Image (cartoon, rainbow, N blue to C red):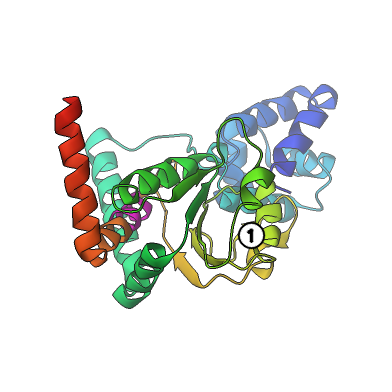
Amino acid sequence: MLLLFLSRIRASLASLHPSEKRLADTLLTFPGEVASYSATELAQLANVSNATVTRFVRRLGYKNFEEARQAARISQESGAAVFQAPSHSLALESGLAAHIEQGRINVEKSFADLSMSQIDSLAQALIDAPRVWIIGFRTAHAFAFYLNAQMGQVLTKVTLLPQAGQTLAESLCSMGPKDVVIVFSLRRPVRQMENVFRELSQLDTHTAVISDSPTLLNQESSICLDSLLTAKWNLHVHTTAPGPLFNHAAVLTLCHLLATRVLELSGTSGRRRLLNIEEMHEALDEM
């Protein structure tokens, strides 16, 4: 379902009349417009008639314009950047202010739903766990990498997944009882995430899910991922943005806070490891 709207347009290009082709070109450039524009507004944008818009959506297989718009909205909500890109951009100063403000709002809304007891519970479990695993695909891999690096200053058994040159099966089979697994499930989730959630549900591990989608919906398969895994910690973050790319300010803030609490709650052992690292920095003349 994810890019079905675009696929239908591409498949019909060869059979379109010139005016319909002009409308198709407009939508392929800014497919998100159909999600928010009326038929009349879309016709004006593409410089075609309302009748052309009607013929076009029926040629794509939709009953009417509203059905086509709903299909585009589903794709837009899934997170595809091409569906977020507007046909116009904000002025430089107002655009900068909008991005900064939205980042602030995302952080405030995210932490209004999260409690320190929830974060401390996860942080202490990470400290006590025999081993910690952090999973992230695509954009989420960057946040998994960051969290791995920060917590790795205190925790000695932290593994980032997926690892280069290895399959996920090789790592999942190494997960033991009472291990803690942190999964970043940010839009848009890869197909493989469905299998990861299913396998984790069969393991005797404690799982934390960091997600920006309340239902963790996999649009490709229409399967609700949270029905496949009951996580001990569900940490929801907001990633709304005024532009085509998600604003991940709240994700990074959560990672920072979680890593900080791991360091603080680790007590003497954590400080001792930090001291050993600094001594090694000095011995290797790295800093």
- 267 shown above or below 2: below
* Residue 259 appears in the picture as rendered: yes
**Residue 6 located left or right of residue 73:** right
Instruction: Report if residue 253 lies within the magenta region.
Output: yes
Q: Which residue is drawn at 49% across and 37% down?
A: 85
Q: Where is residue 21 in the image (x, y as percent from the top left)?
A: 73, 26
- 53 shown above or below 196: above
Instruction: Report if residue 201 lies within the magenta region.
Output: no
State the residue in front, 72 or 197: 197
* Residue 38 appears in the picture as rendered: no
At label 1, counting other C-alpha atoms closer than 10 Å, the crowd grade (few under 14, some 14-19, many 20 or more) is many
Query: Which residues are drawn in magenta?
Result: 249-256
Q: Position of residue 37 (x, y in %)?
A: 56, 48
Q: Position of residue 57 (x, y in %)?
A: 76, 43
Quadrant in which the C terminus appears: top left
Q: Which residue is drawn at 30% across and 56% down?
A: 259
